């Protein structure tokens, strides 16, 4: 290896155990002629080379850890990025704190709005009645306060009809035909009662009527006497009056007996339906047909083309035979009745469904006529189709429950409970806000650490504006000029407390002045509203502007960090390549050392005179 190549190697290692390069040491030999001097110099050169080699690598030929070496260098080079990252972290913390303050301000603004809203709780009223059993009332927000008198002469009633006759059950076959239902002044609607429409039972008839949306509700009422159909108007008063007309429902009825289980006179009768052969129907205990119930069951089991059922009304019980076919095929003929004397079972000899006899069908009875309520309000006569009366007193809804011979007094007064709650919410939200502000701009008393927003002029300005608005006052107003006037006191740290006694006294005895403190022109409420509206403006609001500026700064820093990381990557690539070369050289040092030793030995030949 040449002297220049050794010098290049040592230069690339950038380290030496001496202040002189090997090239310089080798250069000294050319100016020295004394062999003893040469021997001494060469020994020094050899020692210097060994020192260089030993300082370059701990173990001859082992090389270096390139990755660790490069990472160590980059760790120092990356220090500026760590500073940038810390700046971003700090700015994010500031932005988060500002957003929390913004949310607290919005919460406080909501509680202020509850007190300054003209249709809010300050307009809430309560209505007391001297006799709730006759009339009670509610009132809309903003209803004028005052006293009214109400005399209830009669209540509104709801029209109700029911079938006079009761049937064995909700599924018993009904006498066929039809009838009309009319509600109020509406159009009369025909209701069929036959098997073709599924209306030949009480349950089927009720379902059919309800599906027509006529303004009535049909249902089956069952008690110990049997089942009947009930019709109830869905509208009270005369406008909901039910009218039943043109009832053609009928059947071939027997005579009346005491009850469905009363013992019948024994015998038999012949039953013919249409042109079918007549069938003899026994009426005796042996066949279980000696009661109307047993007789109906027997006839139904014979599949004769008729449906038999027991119908009970105020006159007693009787057997009803309803043909299952219309026209001549449904004509019922009763003959050879041997049951008892004087007409036996009492059936009409012939029953023609195409021309049924009048009466004897469902026979609806009026249970209740629909009538309007009659009342006097402040001496003025009023009729109402409903017992819930609105609009007679502006903003007030009356509920009528009974009648009275003397007037009932209604007192409309402010509803103080929700207002008191709103004021306490106002104080609570303010305290949350001012505590957050203080925490962000003041140093921690325990650790001495600065608040997240310490030194932020925007937050200082916001604090000043809020405290100024909260401490504002108005003139006159019957002595209620500021928050302190109604028992809301500010503490040294800016928080508020409420003296409940003072507040309740102000609400009960000076209500309009308290309302004006929050809702009047140039009031505390108006000042707070204007301040909060300015602070929370999405474009020009102080905190929003501050957060937007910080977000822009964070974006710039992130761009710098990104650029710096690209530079570090380039540096890492360059260093890795360089130290890979150095590592290769170091791994070749044993061979290089042997070459150097060989050259040094050649420069220091054995002394022939020794």
Image (cartoon, rainbow, N blue to C red):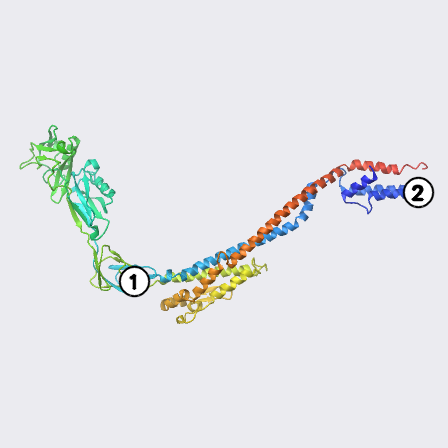
Query: Any mark on residue 128, and which?
Result: 1
Is 496 or 539 nearer to us in this picture? 539
Q: How far across and how far down the image is residue 201, in percent? A: 20, 39
Q: Is residue 310 above or below residue 557?
A: above
- State left or right for residue 60 relative to residue 159: right
Q: Report the mark closest to the observer, 2 or 1.
A: 2
Is 138 or 448 nearer to us in this picture? 138
The extreme top residue here reads: 277
- State left or right for residue 345 relative to residue 31: left
Q: Indicate the quadrant containing the N terminus: top left, top right, bottom left or bottom right.
A: top right
User: Quick check: marks 2 and 1 in contact, CB under 8 Å?
Assistant: no
- In which image quadrant can residue 195 be found? top left
Q: How far across and how far down the image is residue 373, in percent? A: 21, 57
Who's the residue at 41% across and 65% down the image?
A: 518
Q: How far across and how far down the image is residue 134, in percent? A: 24, 59
- State left or right for residue 482 relative to residue 384: right
What secondary structure is found at the residue carrying circle 1?
A: strand
The CA span between labels 2 and 1 is 132 Å
Q: Indicate the quadrant containing the C terminus: top left, top right, bottom left or bottom right.
A: top right
Query: Any mark on residue 449, and which?
Result: none
- In which image quadrant can residue 321 be found? top left
Please indicate, yes or no, whether residue 259 appears anywhere in the rendered image. yes
Please indicate, yes or no, whether residue 55 appears anywhere in the rendered image. no
Query: Any mark on residue 34, and which?
Result: 2
Q: Is residue 179 above or below residue 332?
A: below
What secondary structure is found at the residue carrying circle 2?
A: loop
The disc, 2 or 1, on the residue closer to the chain's N-terminal end is 2
The extreme left residue here reads: 342
Q: Residues within 10 Å of mark 2 (few under 14, many from 20)?
A: few
Q: Residues within 10 Å of mark 1 (few under 14, many from 20)?
A: some
Q: How far across and how far down the image is residue 432, in percent? A: 48, 59
């Amino acid at each position: 290896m040449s002297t220049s190549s050794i010098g290049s190697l040592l230069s690339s290692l950038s380290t030496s155990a001496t202040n002189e390069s090997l090239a310089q040491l080798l250069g000294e030999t050319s100016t020295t002629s004394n062999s003893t001097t040469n021997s001494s110099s060469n020994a020094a050169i050899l020692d210097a080379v060994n020192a260089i080699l030993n300082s370059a690598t701990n173990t001859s030929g082992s090389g270096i850890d390139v990755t660790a070496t490069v990472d160590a260098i980059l760790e120092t080079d990356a220090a500026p990025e760590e500073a940038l990252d810390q700046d971003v972290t700090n700015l994010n913390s500031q932005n988060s704190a500002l957003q929390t303050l913004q949310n607290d301000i919005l919460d406080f603004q909501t509680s202020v709005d509850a007190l300054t809203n003209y249709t809010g709780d300050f307009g809430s009223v309560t209505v007391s009645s001297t006799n709730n059993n006759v009339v009670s009332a509610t009132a809309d927000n903003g209803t004028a306060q005052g006293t009214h008198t109400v005399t209830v002469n009669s209540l509104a009633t709801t029209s109700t009809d029911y079938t006079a006759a009761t049937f064995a059950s909700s599924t018993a076959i009904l006498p066929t035909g039809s009838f009309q239902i009319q509600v109020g002044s509406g159009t009369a609607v025909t209701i069929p009662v036959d098997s073709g429409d599924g209306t030949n039972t009480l349950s089927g008839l009720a379902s059919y009527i309800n599906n027509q949306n006529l303004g009535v509700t049909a249902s089956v009422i069952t008690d110990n006497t049997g089942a009947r159909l009930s019709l109830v108007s869905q509208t009270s008063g005369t406008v909901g009056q039910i009218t039943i007309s043109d009832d053609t429902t009928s059947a071939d009825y027997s005579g009346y007996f005491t009850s469905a289980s009363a013992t019948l006179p024994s015998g038999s009768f012949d039953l013919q339906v249409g042109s079918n052969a007549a069938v003899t129907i026994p009426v005796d205990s042996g066949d279980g047909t000696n009661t109307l119930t047993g007789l109906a069951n027997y006839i139904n089991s014979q599949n004769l083309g008729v449906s038999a059922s027991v119908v009970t009304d105020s006159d007693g019980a009787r057997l009803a035979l309803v043909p299952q076919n219309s026209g001549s095929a449904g004509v019922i003929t009763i003959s050879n009745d041997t049951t008892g004397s004087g007409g036996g079972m009492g059936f009409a000899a012939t029953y023609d469904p195409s021309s049924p006899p009048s009466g004897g069908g469902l026979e609806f009875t009026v249970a209740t006529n629909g009538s309007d309520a009659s009342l006097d309000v402040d001496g003025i006569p009023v009729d109402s189709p409903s017992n819930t009366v609105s609009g007679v007193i502006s903003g007030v809804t009356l509920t009528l429950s009974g009648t009275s011979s003397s007037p009932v007094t209604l007192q409309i007064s402010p509803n103080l409970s929700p207002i008191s709650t709103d004021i306490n919410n106002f104080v609570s939200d303010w305290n949350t806000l001012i505590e957050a502000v203080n925490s962000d701009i003041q140093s921690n008393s325990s650790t001495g650490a600065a608040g997240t927003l310490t030194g932020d002029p925007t937050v200082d300005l916001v604090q000043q504006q809020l405290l100024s608005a909260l401490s504002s006052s108005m003139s006159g107003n019957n002595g209620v000029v500021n928050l302190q006037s109604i028992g809301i006191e500010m503490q040294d740290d800016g928080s508020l407390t409420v003296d409940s006694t003072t507040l309740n006294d102000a609400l009960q005895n000076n209500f309009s002045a308290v309302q004006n403190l929050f809702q009047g022109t140039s009031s505390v409420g108006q000042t707070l509203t204007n301040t909060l509206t300015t602070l929370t403006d999405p474009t020009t609001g102080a905190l929003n502007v501050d957060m937007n500026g910080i977000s822009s700064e964070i974006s710039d820093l992130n761009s710098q960090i990104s650029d710096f990381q690209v530079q570090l990557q380039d540096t890492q690539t360059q260093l890795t390549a360089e130290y890979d070369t150095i590592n290769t050289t170091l791994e070749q040092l044993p061979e290089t050392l042997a070459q150097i030793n060989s050259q040094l030995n050649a420069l220091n030949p054995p002394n022939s005179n020794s």
